[in-house]
Image (spheres, rainbow, N blue to C red):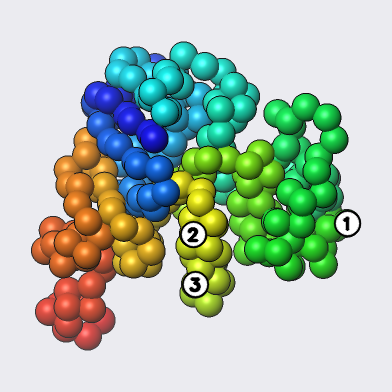
């Protein structure tokens, strides 16, 4: 469904992605792991048409995305819940959700909002509340909900667990799983590597602009490099003794 080929992205003169390639099949839930500054957000922004690649190709069902404007990418069925949520603070929950459906022609069908409220009942309770006054977790729900309003075939999630308490992370991840089970293909960018690998079928590891590993999640969970660098493993802590 999604194919990224030898993608290079530069900011000014500085190259952030040095030629990454990845593939996502329809129905998959794939994670991209990597430390701060690895280029995870840059990769998603390139797919969404928010940054222009220097070279390489991004194909969605065989069609070039990298030459399209971001609203055209949305219209093809690719939406993103961005890092840091980026909800519109001075607008209500419901208004934010409606904005997510902006590429549709005509009125927003009620079933779209009902679907989001079904996944996140908290948003329905707070539909008239200003988004800026929502808690961090509620804003994350809203960011995902807004991305679903365009009825994406492919949903890009950039660190949905960032800054959330463990219990809420669990709940958000369960919802992501449900979204995927309902037929939406998902690319999940995460620093919470263990949780992401438990959810995803496959994963890529990005290290300063390069893909250094790609494998089934079960294999990545047991990979010594991944364990050391990304799982902050109990084993590693045990080795270094009590803090
Ligand atoms: N708008 C920008 N202008 C200049 N450099 C940028 C810009 N956005 C990102 N970069 C640089 O590109 C590199 C990759 O950044 P990116 O945000 O993609 O990383 P990331 O993997 O998402 O990191 P994090 O986990 O901290 O969100 C970094 O070195 C960053 O400083
Ligand atoms: Mg990022």
The answer to whether residue 157 is visible is: no
**Left or right: where 100 falls relative to 241:** right
Q: CA distance from mark 2 to mark 1?
A: 29 Å
**Left or right: where 80 falls relative to 118:** left
Residue positioned 49% across, 72% down in the render: 170
Q: CA distance from mark 2 to mark 3?
A: 16 Å
Q: Quadrant of residue 152?
A: top right
Q: CA distance from mark 1 to mark 3?
A: 26 Å
Disc 1 or 3, which lies upstream in sequence?
A: 1
Mark 2 lies on residue: 181
Q: Quadrant of ligand 2?
A: top left
Q: How many residues crowd mark 1 within 10 Å: few (<14), some (14–19), many (20+)? A: few
> Where residue 209 appears, x then y in whole percent?
26, 34
Which label sits on residue 226?
Answer: none
Mark 3 lies on residue: 170
Residue mark closest to the camera, 2 vs 3: 2
Q: How many residues crowd mark 2 within 10 Å: few (<14), some (14–19), many (20+)? A: some
Query: In the image, is residue 138 above or below residue 1?
Result: below
> Where residue 203 appears, x then y in whole percent?
28, 51
Q: How many residues crowd mark 3 within 10 Å: few (<14), some (14–19), many (20+)? A: some
Residue mark closest to the camera, 2 vs 1: 2
Which label sits on residue 128?
Answer: 1
Disc 2 or 3, which lies upstream in sequence?
A: 3
Answer whether labels 2 and 1 touch (C-beta < 8 Å).
no
């Amino acid at each position: 469904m999604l194919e990224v080929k030898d993608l290079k992205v530069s900011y000014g003169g500085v190259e952030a992605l040095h030629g990454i390639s990845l593939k996502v099949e329809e129905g998959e839930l794939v994670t991209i792991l990597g430390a701060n500054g690895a280029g995870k957000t840059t990769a998603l922004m390139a797919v969404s048409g928010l940054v222009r690649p220097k070279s390489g190709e991004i194909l969605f069902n065989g069609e070039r995305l990298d030459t399209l404007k971001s609203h055209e990418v949305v219209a093809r069925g690719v939406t993103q819940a961005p890092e840091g949520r980026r909800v519109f603070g001075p607008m209500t929950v419901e208004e934010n959700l409606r904005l997510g459906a902006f590429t549709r022609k005509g009125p927003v069908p009620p079933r779209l909002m009902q679907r989001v409220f079904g996944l996140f009942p908290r948003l329905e309770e707070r539909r008239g509340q200003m988004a800026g006054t929502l808690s961090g977790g509620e804003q994350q729900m809203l960011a995902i909900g807004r991305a679903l309003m365009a009825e994406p075939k492919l949903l890009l999630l950039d660190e949905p667990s960032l800054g959330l308490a463990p219990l809420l992370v669990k709940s958000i991840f369960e919802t992501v799983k449900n979204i995927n089970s309902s037929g939406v293909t998902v690319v999940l960018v995460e620093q919470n590597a263990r949780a992401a690998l438990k959810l995803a079928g496959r994963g890529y590891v990005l290290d300063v602009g390069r893909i250094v590993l790609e494998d089934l999640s079960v294999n990545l969970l047991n990979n010594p490099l991944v364990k050391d660098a990304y799982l902050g493993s109990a084993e590693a802590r045990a080795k270094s003794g009590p803090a």
